[in-house]
Image: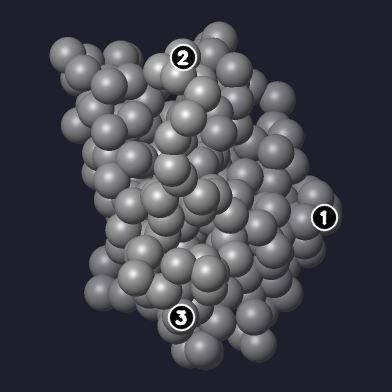
Amino acid sequence: MAFGNRYEKNAHDKANLTDKQSTRDFPDYDKYIEYEKILTTKLTIKFRGERKIYLDNAVSRINDIKWEEVGTIVSNEDADLACEFLRRLALFYKNECLRPQPPMFSNIAKLLGDTENELLISMYCNSRVLEFVANHQYIEKLFVFYIQLSIYVDKKPKYTEYLNVYEPLIRILERGGFFVIRPQELEIQNVKYIPLNGWFDKFVSTEPYNISEF
């Protein structure tokens, strides 16, 4: 440290704020609260003076998911949400005249021309989100794509409509459902299995699914 060699470490100094394990050695120290303070400070410094309406909305939505309920509620409506995601993604590729990629790898911001490096989710999401996505990397990738697109849309609002592409999958999690997405399949837990071979041709001309009440 630049402030001298002798100092006493307190609980704040000793705790690793990014460690997912509980701080058992310091019972009076709430790692989660401290982490949220630091995260808020980082975001304030990073984006001070910049327009970030869509970013704020995206991050708040992800952070507000009740992770303890995810995977506990089975609903057939989640299958319609998954299909609507594929329909919207197919229309994105059609509208932008782009060659379709597997849904799992569809980073819309990059496809639209964003040149920023893929962001670190730890700079935006709270500790509970990080704990969950540590075991579900495909959901982490979805959130990274969603946040990256929201940043891009704050700079280029003409692409606002494409934020709605990822929205149905996020809504599944908000409703307490769960899904697994792989290069060749999208599975809604205990509800529906959707093979992704030829997904673009199947969904590009599909009528919108009625998900307004979900």
Q: Quarter-wise, where is residue 33 in the image?
A: bottom left
Gap in angstroms between the C-alphas marked 3 and 2: 43 Å
Question: Disc 1 on helix, strand or loop?
Answer: loop
Q: Nearer the viewer, mark 3 or mark 1?
A: 3
Dot 1 alpha-carbon crowd within 10 angstroms: few under 14, some 14 to 19, many 20 or more: some
Of residue 126 and residue 21, the one placed in the foreground of this image is 21
**Image location of residue 52, percent across then percent down:** 24, 26
Looking at the image, tell me whether mark 3 or mark 2 is earlier in sequence order.
2
For marks 1 and 2, the one nearer the N-term is: 2
From the image, which quarter does the C terminus lie in? bottom left
Tag 3 near tag 2, CB within 8 Å: no
Give the residue displayed 17% in from the left and 14% down from the top. 49
Q: CA distance from mark 1 to mark 2?
A: 53 Å
Residue 117 or 142: which is nearer the viewer? 117
Q: Circle 3 sits in a helix, a strand or a loop, which is it?
A: loop
Q: Are marks 1 and 2 in contact (CB under 8 Å)?
A: no
Where does label 3 land, which residue? 68
Q: Secondary structure at mark 2?
A: loop
Give how far apart the Cα atoms at labels 3 and 1 are.
28 Å
Q: How is the image coloured?
A: one colour
Q: Which mark is residue 184?
A: 1
Can the viewer see residue 84 in this picture? no
Residue at image mark 2: 2
Q: Is residue 146 left or right of residue 202?
A: left
Rendered residue at 58%/60% (across/down):
20
Q: Is residue 121 left or right of residue 160?
A: right
Q: Amino acid at mark 1?
A: Gln
Q: Amino acid at mark 3?
A: Glu
Residue 195 percent coordinates (x, y): 78, 63
Q: Earlier in the sequence, mark 3 or mark 1?
A: 3
